[in-house]
Amino acid sequence: MSRRGVLLDRDGTLIEDRGYLARPEQVSLLPGVREGMAELKRLGFALAVVSNQSGVARGYFNEAAVEAVNRRINELLGTAAGVDRFFFCPHLREGIVPEYSFECECRKPKPGMIERAAREMDLDLARSFLVGDARRDLAAGREARVGKVVLVLTGTAELVRDLMGVPTEADHVARDLLSAVEWIRGR
């Protein structure tokens, strides 16, 4: 039987959004993230990060840099709260690195990265959750038919602009990841 999972955006959801993050020493967990992730693990959820990383296509850094940042995130989280799998989209149609500069199906708001995570991790998306800080996260979760999508208010100025009088597609809006986990626990 497929597992329940929580699919999480990375920048602005788990860690401070510093733009095009290329170095592990720049990683800073947001408050409550370690505790929230540990609770999700205790509840038996599989944990996957699904993150757009267009800095690769833009030529700012390579895939190895993304992987180094992801390893640092798990070092900071520790074994009890670590991410099971990281998935990222390095593509951007308008990129400058030819092998990454095309329209793909994995770049959020498209659902491809989430669908890949579900296949590779044997996740039941209908019984799973997606947590993100932007409309593209929510849209990708809806398109992939994730059971519940949660918006956290820890992201960038884009979020503030999105929420100004505009209805959200979220099943729940949470102050931060720890608050999102409290809501997920009751479902």
Image (tube, rainbow, N blue to C red):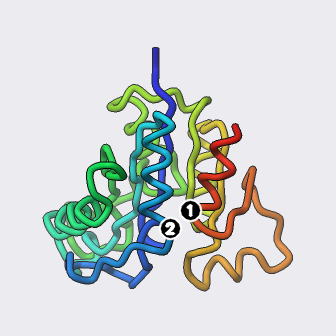
Q: Is residue 56 above or below residue 9?
A: below
Residue 137 image point, x, y percent: 56, 58
Residue bearing the label numbered 1: 177
Residue 6 image point, x, y percent: 50, 44
Residue 100 image point, x, y percent: 25, 62
State the image quarter where residue 91 is shown.
bottom left
Farthest residue to the left: give it: 64
Question: At label 1, which amino acid type do we have?
Answer: Leu
Q: State the residue at coordinates (55%, 32%).
A: 125
Count the labels in the image: 2
Question: At label 2, which amino acid type do we have?
Answer: Gly
Split into 4 quadrants, where in the image is the C terminus?
top right
Please indicate whether residue 51 sits to the left or right of residue 59 in the image: right
The residues tagged by marks 2 and 1 sit, at their Cα atoms, a distance apart of: 7 Å
| Mark 2 or 1, closer to the camera | 2
Residue 32's disc is: 2
Q: State the residue at coordinates (27%, 59%).
A: 74
Please indicate whether residue 115 sits to the left or right of residue 177 in the image: left
- Look at the numbered disc 1 and give the secondary structure of its residue: helix
Q: State the residue at coordinates (33%, 49%).
A: 80
Q: Is residue 154 above or below residue 150?
A: below
Q: Are marks 2 and 1 in contact (CB under 8 Å)?
A: yes
